[in-house]
Amino acid sequence: MCIGIPMKVLSAGEFTATCVSETSDARQSVDIRLVGAVAPGRWLLVFLGTARRLLEDDEAALICSALRSLSAAADGDDITGLFPDLDDREPVLPPHLEHIRRGNAVQ
């Protein structure tokens, strides 16, 4: 599985931007050739050192929250409130995975 990490742009040049993630103060050089020019303060979805797309602030916050919840779940911590987009509904599996959860093979 591939997981993109939201990173905030601190400064940008023509082909790279210096970014930082929500969970680390470590600065990382990110290739921005797939997304074009970016301004400081913007969020990027970064995978393997390359920005895949621009993120709006609210989407970056949702992804960061989901990543924190994965870490908390792996540690056995409470994840209540870490998926704000699921506060008013239960998550639903796609049909092909629901069959597996119920012990039925996909037809």
Image (spheres, helix red, strand yellow):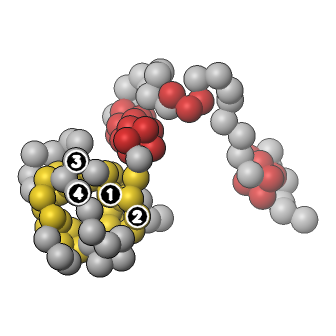
Whether residues under marks 2 and 4 lie with C-beta atoms below 8 angstroms apart, the answer is no
**Is the C-beta separation of discs 1 and 2 under 8 Å?**
yes
Q: Which residue is mark 2?
A: 53
Q: Kindly identify the residue that appears in the image at 74 percent across and 51 percent down.
A: 94
- Which residue type carries mark 3? Gly
The kind of secondary structure element at disc 1 is strand
Q: Could you say which is closer to the camera, residue 100 or residue 49?
A: 49
Q: Say which element carries label 2.
A: strand
Q: Earlier in the sequence, mark 2 or mark 4?
A: 4
Residue contact at pointers 4 and 3, CB within 8 angstroms: yes
Q: Quadrant of the C terminus?
A: bottom right
> Which amino acid is tagged 1?
Leu
According to the picture, the residue beneath numbered tag 3 turns out to be 41
Residue 75: give x, y in percent of width and height: 34, 34
Which callout, 1 or 4, points at the residue further toward the start of the chain? 4
Say left or right for 9 vs 54.
left
